[in-house]
Image (spheres, grey):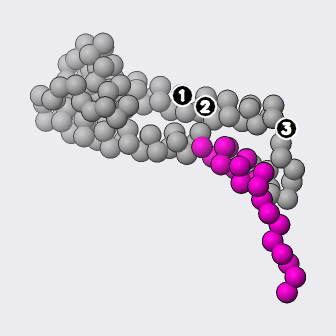
């Protein structure tokens, strides 16, 4: 996916396309995760779609739950969804940060001295 350090830097336009692709992947992951949370809260806790959206969005964003789940299944879902949301946050940071870090390291790559 990324060019080797021995190759020249890709042009700015290609780099921006790479960033946009990464952002698109992140938005897709967040959207699917939000939808999964909404379905879980709607089905397991009997919440309306708006309340399910609020609960899923608050947990996915790291703000925490809005209210306490009532059913055992809802409690298990909320805990599992919270753990999943933490992993999603880490993955999103990695997906967005990888092209930026790669370009930074590529730009400032120093050739190692091969003289023995």
Distance Cα–Cα, label 3 vs label 2: 19 Å
> Which element is circle 1 on?
helix
Residue at 18%, 36% in the rendered image: 75
Q: Identify the residue at horizontal 28%, vertical 24% (top origin).
A: 55
Numbered label tally: 3
Let me know if residue 71 is in the magenta part: no
List the residue tagged with mark 2: 23
Image disc number at residue 27: 1
Label 3 Cα neighbours within 10 Å, binned few <14 / some 14-19 / many ≥20: few
Judging depth in this view, the residue of 71 and 109 nearest the camera is 109
The residue that appears at 66% across and 43% down in the rendered structure is 100
Of badges 3 and 1, the one in the foreground is 3
Helix, strand or loop at mark 2: helix
Q: Which residue is mark 3?
A: 11
Mark 2 touches mark 1? (CB < 8 Å): yes
Which mark is first along the chain, 2 or 3? 3
Q: In the drawing, does residue 28 fall left or right of residue 67?
A: right
For residue 36, say whether it is visible.
Answer: no
Marking on residue 7: none
Q: Is residue 78 left or right of residue 100?
A: left
Q: Position of residue 84 (x, y in %)?
A: 37, 41
Q: Nearer the viewer, residue 100 or 68?
A: 100
């Amino acid at each position: 996916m990324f060019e080797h350090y021995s190759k020249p830097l890709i042009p700015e336009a290609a780099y921006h396309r790479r960033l946009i692709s990464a952002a698109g992947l992140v938005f897709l992951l967040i959207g699917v995760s939000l939808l999964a949370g909404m379905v879980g809260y709607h089905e397991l806790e009997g919440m309306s779609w708006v309340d399910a959206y609020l609960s899923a969005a608050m947990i996915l964003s790291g703000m925490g739950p809005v209210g306490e789940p009532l059913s055992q299944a809802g409690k298990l879902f909320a805990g599992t969804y919270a753990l999943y949301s933490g992993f999603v946050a880490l993955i999103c940071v990695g997906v967005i940060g990888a092209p930026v870090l790669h370009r930074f390291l590529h730009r400032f790559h120093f050739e190692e001295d091969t003289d023995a």
